[in-house]
Image (cartoon, helix red, strand yellow):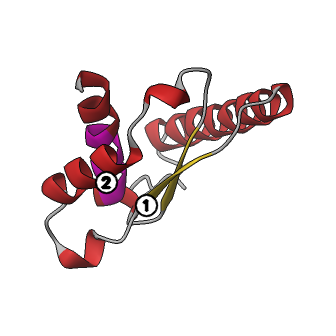
Amino acid sequence: MLCHRALTAATATSIHMEGPGTFFISGPDVKFIDIALLDRLLHEMVKMSPLQGSRFEVIPTSDEMGIIGAAVNADRAHKIRRLSVQFRHGTRQSSLVLA
């Protein structure tokens, strides 16, 4: 139950920052995740109706999926690092928004 609450809290934070959507769950221990419990906990944490409407989806894990995920995370980390350096040096005057 504790891991369900942690996953739901992270998802609720993401919803509040980026809006509702589909959240994909993958990994070797995904068989222990109760999607109905995640949905119920998420509905308790996200009360505003415009932010509701997210859903969870379990996708099978493969080596290819792991490689793609690692590449996407590396690309995001590189963009975040580059933007934070630009922001610190004053080349960006607007607020930092990461996609």
**Residue 64: percent from left, percent from top:** 86, 32
The residue that disc 1 covers is 55
Of the two numbered discs 2 and 1 on the same chain, state the one appearing first in sequence. Answer: 2
* Label number found at residue 94: none
Q: Residue at x 34, y 50 (%)?
A: 36
- Give how far apart the Cα atoms at labels 2 and 1 are: 7 Å
Horizontal arrangement in the rendering, residue 26 relative to residue 21 (left or right): right
Examine the rendering and report whether any part of residue 40 can be seen. yes
SS of the residue under disc 2:
helix
Residues at discs 2 and 1 in contact (Cβ within 8 Å): yes
Q: Is residue 79 above or below residue 95?
A: above
Q: Quadrant of residue 77?
A: top right
Is 9 within the magenta?
A: yes
Question: Which quadrant does the N terminus fall into?
Answer: top left
The residue that disc 2 covers is 39
Name which residue type carries label 1.
Arg
Q: Is residue 55 above or below residue 65?
A: below
**Residue 47: percent from left, percent from top:** 13, 65
- Magenta highlight range: 8-15
SS of the residue under disc 1:
strand
